[in-house]
Image (spheres, coloured by chain):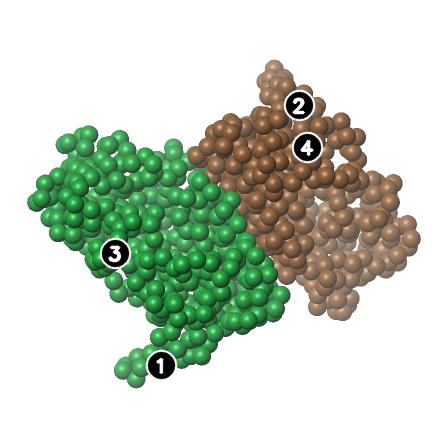
Chain colours: A green, B brown
Amino acid sequence: MLAKRLQVLTQLNNFLKNKRVLITGIKGFVGPYLAEEILNLNGEVYGIDLPGEIGIHPLKKIIENVEIFEGNLEEKNFVSKVIKKVKPDFIFHLAAKSSTFESFLKPIDFLKANCIGTLNLLETLRKTETSTTFIFAGSSDEYGIVISSYKQYKKLKKKYGEIIPRPNKIPEFPVNEDNPLRPLSPYALTKIYGDFLTRQYSNFTKIKGIVARSFNHEGAGRGKGFVSRDIINQVILCKREGINKIKAGNIMAMRDWSHVKDIVKGYILIAEKGENGSVYNLGSGRTNSVLTFILLSLECAGFKIFEIKSKKYLKKKIENPLEERKINIYGFKFDSFNIDELVMKEKINFDIEDEGVIIETQKGKIEILIDEKRLRPSDAPILLCDNTKIKKLGFRINFTLKDIIKEMLEYYQTISLE
Amino acid sequence: MLAKRLQVLTQLNNFLKNKRVLITGIKGFVGPYLAEEILNLNGEVYGIDLPGEIGIHPLKKIIENVEIFEGNLEEKNFVSKVIKKVKPDFIFHLAAKSSTFESFLKPIDFLKANCIGTLNLLETLRKTETSTTFIFAGSSDEYGIVISSYKQYKKLKKKYGEIIPRPNKIPEFPVNEDNPLRPLSPYALTKIYGDFLTRQYSNFTKIKGIVARSFNHEGAGRGKGFVSRDIINQVILCKREGINKIKAGNIMAMRDWSHVKDIVKGYILIAEKGENGSVYNLGSGRTNSVLTFILLSLECAGFKIFEIKSKKYLKKKIENPLEERKINIYGFKFDSFNIDELVMKEKINFDIEDEGVIIETQKGKIEILIDEKRLRPSDAPILLCDNTKIKKLGFRINFTLKDIIKEMLEYYQTISLE
């Protein structure tokens, strides 16, 4: 057994040794984490990113020692020049405009950056007949609408009209790679484009193309404009300056949150052991609401939470929302909380009609205000990753949601919130 | 009954009366047919297309009397100017680069023309808050791989690797709107983008967006580079100049061929009665191989066909390949031919290994040569439209495959083949 484990470790250490690895979007949130892992495995890391300084990031130093080619993936000649120079054995294509919210406002920028960017990379590899392994960072947003119950299905039909394709089973949870794609944002559509394109090119070129459909991932370094960072920032202000209001959008959205460190290990695993032309879900196999993310952040910041209630309907309330629960839903088990169990079982719902949620803590009331400006025109209700397929390659999750939040709180407390 | 029928006719005549209708790609193959129908229904037709002469087309005259705005859909300002000027009640968005074959060679041109073009139209409508009905001409190519049997599934897995999503039933025929999308070409991907985008915009803007997934449609005016026209041209040469060779690509591909006149009626029906945000398959509910298209064209051109056989394996042969058959497959019935029944039942297969097919006719042998240059890197094996949904709106097919071929032969015999 030990011998076998050592062998596995050795393999992992070897497959990237002296291999030339190109990371696109290396200055982003995920890039530095991935670069660090690859450097630890003795790979040679190269980067592509737009010109400009890397933002606030705990691994900024790592990137400063990597050769980065600055330019725009939308420019064919730039891409071609870099590929010819680096001759990568592996490409991790992370570069993308990634804010779902923003994609409703600037869909053309998203189309150009994400679709043309990906196409330029694949076309260059095709034309130079390179047998690179190309890992495309897809997204759980590609799934969009996922049907969790008949009741929810009815509600979704009322909201979105006909759901196409119709579910062939209800619930569709947890979401595996065979789930229909029903994207709800222009961003999600650009990821579907890259996902399919990568697999098409794996069919008729020398490229080994594999897609990772990553679910939410967070950690220190997550940029502004993302829900997690937005919440953490506001919770720090609650703690530090006694502010007792938090603005949020769709707090009922349930997401499968992982630590970015677990996700980058998944990318590397897929590069080593993934099948050509295949798709792998990459997520934790847990789901928690945005509301839970807020409550948990408050708790980690020192607030004891006794009760939450609707601002408008005071009788609508939950005691001990963060009491731990072993959830067993649709035959799928994960550790969760009172509030999430109630949401998933459709026993409670806080939305715009409630005007907000009042949180009773030992330090007094804190209010969550549902902010219309933070609501998206359309939003996936629940995402929960079936990670069975990637687990078979050896994947596992090391961090809990609490670990992630604690790390983010700690990090952002030490730096400016601007 | 008669009263009811008259009422339906009156409705059809009325809903477009004095309505402002914009057709993109009006100089293409389908545009003039659609324009003619709409003019007959007393709609006001406007067109968008690239600058330049309209090609050879039987309805060229129709278009010459329509106001056409010349410019490129990739240019936002042009699109915006036209929409503000026309103020369309209906848009039929047909404009697209549409050669699957070419899309493998120029995927970036396809991405720009088809995706950016569609996005510019929808964005303009969103920004001007116009409640236009927007019909997107999608494609059966969006479906790509469709599983017809366990045997074929095994074969496809060998060719393409894992099929994602896996089928939840086998066969997946006929293809209805719930079938998974497994596109096989860069062209197909651009159509998926437009399909999803149209439906997304119908969710969160005033646009009434509906998608028609059109299966193959043909007729007089079909441009060069398309399989149907390519075959017709060669058959005319066989007849006129005694040439006894026809070059073709994947002659085993089975397609659902309709007459373009039936298809444009479908578009209009969807505009009148289709549900916001929905998808309608638009096809004949028949499927015939490219091989059948060739044989039938020869027959219509005066060749009696006795037998066909493999060029390499002479024992592999079929007598009376065009003998009529009532096919009943997967509970779906349609009129077809001996050869198609054998192909669908996987009893015969002619591919590159056969080097070609020898056709015995009363005027001697004609040879079909499988031309590698005409093969696509990847190609959907069988497409057969389940048109139940659109039939419920009143759709019906008026033309047989023979009608289509006869009309094409007649038309192209009278004009230059260049």
Residue at x 60% of width, y 69% of height: A129
Q: Label 3's element?
A: loop
Q: Chain of mark 2?
A: B
Q: Nearer the viewer, residue B387 or A43?
A: A43
Mark 3 → mark 2, Cα distance in angstroms: 62 Å
Kindly indicate whether the residue at mark 3 contacts the one at mark 4 (C-beta within 8 angstroms): no
Q: Residue at x 21, y 53 (%)?
A: A336
| Residue B331 figure quarter | top right
**Residue at the disc numbered 1:** A10
Q: Identify the image quadrant of residue A379.
A: top left
Nearer to us of marks 1 and 4 is: 4
Please identify, in this view, whether the residue under mark 4 or under mark 3 is nearer the observer: 3
Tag 1: residue type?
Thr
Measure the C-alpha gap from mark 4 to mark 3: 55 Å
**Badge 2: residue crowd in 10 Å (few <14, some 14–19, many ≥20):** many
**From this viewpoint, which residue is outermost toward the right?**
B241
The three-letter amino acid code for the residue at tag 3 is Ile
The residue beneath circle 4 is B69
Residue B415 position by quadrant: top right
Q: Give the class, few, some or many, for how many residues have Cα within 10 Å of label 1's Cα (few <14, many ≥20).
A: few
Q: Secondary structure at mark 4?
A: strand
Give the label on residue B44, or none: 2
Q: Is residue B125 left or right of residue B407?
A: left
Determine the residue located farthest toward the top in the rendered image. B3
How far apart are the two marked residues, 2 and 4, measured between alpha carbons?
14 Å
Of tags 2 and 4, the one toward the viewer is 4
Question: Mark 4 is on which residue type?
Answer: Phe
Disc 3 from disc 1: Cα separation = 38 Å
Question: Label 1 is found on which chain of the structure?
Answer: A
